Amino acid sequence: MDQSSISRRFSLKKIIGQGNFGMIYKALDTETNQQVAIKLIKNRNGIHELQNEVKMLTRLQGGDGIPQLIWSDRTSNHYVMELLGPCVNDKFIKLNRVMTASNFILISEQVLERLEFIHNKSIIHRDLKPHQLVMGGPKHKKVYLIDFGLSKIFESQGGKHIPYSEGRAFVGTFNYASLNAHIGIQQSRRDDLESFCYILAYFLTGDLPWRTSLVTQNEATIKKMKLSIKPHELFGNEVSLGRIFNYTRSLKFDQKPDYIYIKTLLDEHKKTISNLNNRISWKLKRNSSMRNKDKNTKIRKKRNKSVIEKIIIELDENDMSVTQVNNEYPEFKTRQRSLRKKMISEAPTIDSLKITQDTSCLLV
Ligand SMILES: Nc1ncnc2c1ncn2[C@@H]1O[C@H](COP(=O)(O)OP(=O)(O)OP(=O)(O)O)[C@@H](O)[C@H]1O
């Protein structure tokens, strides 16, 4: 399908999200009369990530909690996918970073399932963070994993794992990256699982040890803190969660994680929860036994941040929660240059979006 037919088929409505690379638009698919989401790169530098994302999503199609790809083209600066609901992190922030114990376990289990699925498809995510978890499916009750722009295939069809290497450029997000990612070791399945642990700690306690002050919000300090971090500093008395962290840190570079073992540890945590719901719900009941906030007051650090500091950290207005990608990153550097050149010359820019008077947009 060429650019003109896509402009006839999809009518852009409004911006519903944006990240480093892309703008996400809500749009109407006039062929099916369905609401869809269109990811359009902000500028031509994002073309590599977009192309990579389409490749990964194509491989992952059909997976539970993976956005359905509706339209894509190798040379285009956008692709169309199913429209999802609110971002889990936005919901969490709106609730003053308090998550019910029930939501916590349901979300954790689903994220683990997504990771096992993508790993079984030979893909590592490499940029896992709460911002990449979006509610979707019927009544928005399911957790979807999004943003595969930095993902990578870690094994060949014959099952040969990518080789261990050091001195890699950092790729990912400082607040949630594994220690090895900071050190420059080639990432593998274990790194996704370590990021998973940081997400768990963030949802459980409302913060991460390096996220509590602007003084610690720099890469060198985050890396230093991750070097010596102990499970109880992340998870307090939640021993089974701490054991997940220890396990992920013990994994060898090319080792297949034992997802069943991790699930067993999540189950142990689950047993301590009363009032367990079977579906994720964002209606916060004032029932202390359901609130991680009350359960984990000890590890919720006393927050005596200044108002400005609080705003900067909580809105993730510093770079530590923003995806970092080095333009010199080898994978993007070694892409077929001819194809790259072709895409860059053909790809329309965001300027080619015309906003019509009724504030809906059209791709022209
Ligand atoms: N299919 C979708 N339906 C609804 N909202 C979406 C969809 N995809 C993404 N979003 C929203 O848009 C936001 C940005 O999307 P995404 O993370 O893919 O962009 P990005 O530019 O790759 O971000 P990053 O800077 O993390 O790399 C998400 O956090 C989410 O809130």
Image (cartoon, grey):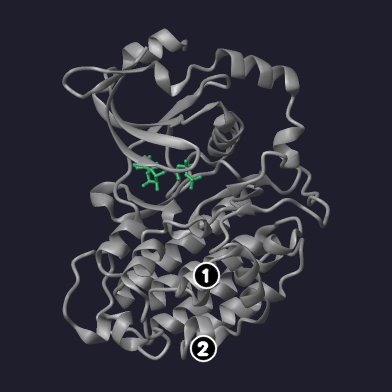
- SS type, badge 2: helix
In this view, 79 is above or below 104:
above
**Mark 2 to mark 1 CA distance (whole Å):** 15 Å
Q: Residue at x 49, y 58 (%)?
A: 321
* Disc 1: CA contacts within 10 A as few (<14), some (14-19) or many (>=20): many
Q: Relative to 119, does residue 68 appear above or below in the rendering?
A: above
Q: Is residue 293 left or right of residue 352?
A: left
Residue at 23%, 23% in the rendered image: 360
- Where in the figure is residue 143, as x and y percent of width and height? 38, 55
What residue appears at the point 35 percent right and 58 percent down from the top-left corner? 88
Q: Picture coordinates of residue 125 (x, y %)?
A: 59, 51
Taking the spot 39% from the left edge, 62% from the top edge, the residue there is 312
Looking at the image, in which quadrant does ligand 1 appear? top left
In the figure, residue 362 lies in which quadrant?
top left
For residue 323, above or below residue 296:
above
Q: Quadrant of the C terminus?
A: top left
Q: Earlier in the sequence, mark 2 or mark 1?
A: 1
Q: In the visual, does 346 lie left or right of 106? A: right
Disc 2 residue: CB within 8 Å of ligand 1: no
Name the mark nearer the viewer: 2 or 1: 1
Amino acid at circle 1 = Tyr
Q: Nearer the viewer, residue 311 or 76?
A: 311
Q: Which residue matches tag 2? A: 239
SS at mark 1 in the image: helix
Task: Name the disc covering residue 208, or none.
Answer: none
The amino acid pointed to by label 2 is: Val
Q: Residue 322, image x and y in percent?
A: 50, 52
Q: Nearer the viewer, residue 168 or 221?
A: 221
- The residue wearing badge 1 is 198
Q: Is mark 1 within 8 Å of ligand 1?
A: no
